[in-house]
Structures are given as C-alpha cells and as structure tokens.
Amino acid sequence: MRPRRILAAIALLAAGAQTAPPAADIRPVHDPVLIREGATWHVFSTGIGKDGQGLIAARTSADLVTWAPGTPPFASLPEWAARAIPGARNLWAPDISFVNGRYRLYYSVSTFGSNRSAIGLATTPTLDPKRPGYGWRDEGMVLQSRPGDAYNAIDPAFVVDRQGRHWLSFGSFWSGLKLVELNPVTGKPLRPAAKPLALASRPVPAGAPSIIEAPYIFQRGGWYWLIASYDYCCKGVNSTYYTVIGRSRTIAGPYRGKDGSSMLAGGGTLLLRADLEEKGRFRGPGHAGQYRGADGVDRLVYHAYDKENAGAPTLRIATLHWGADGWPVARPQGE
C-alpha cells in the first residue's frame, strides 16, 4: 500500500475509534474537563474515591475511547483549603488550560449545599509525570464566597478574550453565574475588590436559589459562547440536569439563545437534553466543557448518569457540529 494510502487508512481508523463511546475507566466521573498534551488526552474531574483520586481525579487516553487512571495532581488537601473551608474532604469541578508555558488547574473547595466556598489554582509545566520538570505547584486561593454573599465560588472555567484579557467564570445556584477578570501573570483577580459580573441566572421565587451552575465560555465565529447546566445533578437516574448554550458578541454578555431569550432570565438553547425517557440509558447530562484540538474539532466533555450501571456518573464525550445557522448540535460518541 502506498504511503499516502497508509496515512489515509490510519486517519480513518483514528476517526472511527473516536466515534465509539468512552470505555474502561469512565466511572465514577463528575464534572470532567478535557485537554491534550502531545499524543495523550487528559481528563480531570471532581475527586471521588480514595487517596489522590479522591481530591482531583485524573484519567488519560490515547484515542478518546479507552481511558485509564492517571496521576492525580494532589496527594492531600491543600493546607489553605482545609483552613478556609472547614469540613471539606475533596476538590470539585476542575478546569485545565495551558497559559504562558504552564498548565493552570483551577479547582473548587466547598461542602455540599453551602456557599462557604473557594476556588484555588495549581500549575505545572507538563501533565506527563515522566517528563522533566513535572510537578504541581499549588498557587493558593483565587477567590472566595461566604455565607451572605449572593454567589457561590465553585465551578471555575478560564477563558481568554479577543483582546488577550484573561477571565474566570464560575458559579452554582445562589444568584447564578459570574465573571471576573484575572491578572494574566498570577491567574488571580485583577481587581480583587471588584464585584463579579453577572453572566446568567434563572428566575425563582424570592429567597430561592437560581438552579443553574457550571459556566463555560469559548469563542467561535466571532461569538462568545456560554454553556451552562440547569436543574439538578447528583440524583443518579433521577437527575434532571440538562445543558444549554447562548452566545454574545462581548465576553460579559448578554448571552442569548437561538430564540433571543436571555440567559440572565433563564433562557438559552438546549444543547444536551435531560434524558428521562424509560428507554434512555444516560440521564441528566451536564457540567460540560469544550475543547478544540489541533484538528479544529470542538469536543464537549460532560457527565451523565448511567441507567445500566446503577445510575453511576459516567464520562461522556460529544462532538459539536455547527449548522448553517451558526448554532451547534451535540452528537455523543457512539450515537
């Protein structure tokens, strides 16, 4: 077979592999985020289990299909986190980016149902434990929320705007999703005393929380796109979680759905649905993050609850297909 045909065959095999659903070490996975270094794909997610995997869990894959345990970033809870958030036992909802020659891992520290929470930052020059220089350096607290604040400092996601300014979106329940500008050198708030900007919320009765969380912003086609999760996670096959998306010409919004509905008022366009039909296997898809690889493909990584595995939170990956109207449709691997 000619070299060109060999390369084409390899490409077809690789493409075929990526159409299969994730397999092997894919549960329990909550709040995953995806990145690639060299030939290796990495997923980091909320800590579940023992030892380092109970802080931030790590997994690796060569093909986006077969996943294996990776090396977790933390061996123990950072000292500052234990002091700031009494009762915290693990770390939640990480976000990973490569910035200024180092990987930045933002992560959440909290206890369930509370907004006594904090976001921390750790960095490393490489994700490969076998490479020289590998090692996570905890950079400490980025920002914090306390009882009485109108927001909850968890679910961070990093983004750079068209002008090169650095931002962090975050938020869960309370008054909704927020945005702060970062110092590009430190990765921490540029103006620590500034009030976070409002990105999205859902109308609720007075005194009730806004049932929204997990913001993620990315750019495409001259737009900023905001992904968010609505309704309830963490109830196994009874989870009502689902994912919506909106877009804006400016990073601070307002973000609107395809029908013009504002995400500040619970609007947006459905991206991943709450699969509550009896025949459906995966329920409550949410906490989605986007990653665009060197191939230019936009991939969505998220978790859903597997009916065939006792409702376990499970790693899911979808490809975003962009229509003629400029809006995405998510197609999960294997479907």
Image (cartoon, rainbow, N blue to C red):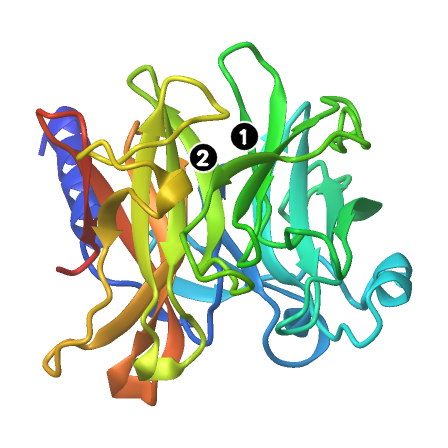
Q: Position of residue 74 (x, y in %)?
A: 75, 61
- Considering the image in quadrants, where does the C terminus appear? bottom left
Check the image and report above or below for 51 versus 166: below
- Residue 12 visible (yes or no): yes
Q: Nearest the camera: 267 or 72? A: 267
Horizontal side, residue 26 vs residue 92: left or right: left
Q: Position of residue 204 (x, y in %)?
A: 43, 59
Horizontal side, residue 155 vs residue 61: left or right: right
Q: Which residue is mark 2?
A: 217
Mark 1 residue element: strand
Could you tell me which residue is drawn at 76 percent across and 33 percent down? 188
Q: Which residue is mark 1?
A: 159
As drawn, the label of residue 136 is none
Residue lying furthest top in this view? 163
Check the image and report above or below for 252 versus 202: above
Crowding near the residue tagged with mark 1, few <14, some 14–19, many ≥20 C-alpha atoms within 10 Å: some
Q: Nearest the camera: 281 or 175? A: 175
Mark 2 residue element: strand
Check the image and report above or below for 209 versus 37: below
Q: Earlier in the sequence, mark 2 or mark 1?
A: 1
Verify CB contact (< 8 Å) between mark 2 and mark 1.
yes
- Residue 18 visible (yes or no): no
Q: Amino acid at mark 2?
A: Ile
Q: Position of residue 235 (x, y in %)?
A: 41, 81
Could you tell me which residue is drawn at 35 percent across and 48 percent down? 266
User: Whole-Å distance between the Cαs marked 2 and 1?
Assistant: 6 Å
Q: Position of residue 196 (x, y in %)?
A: 65, 35
Could you tell me which residue is drawn at 24 percent across and 62 percent down? 21
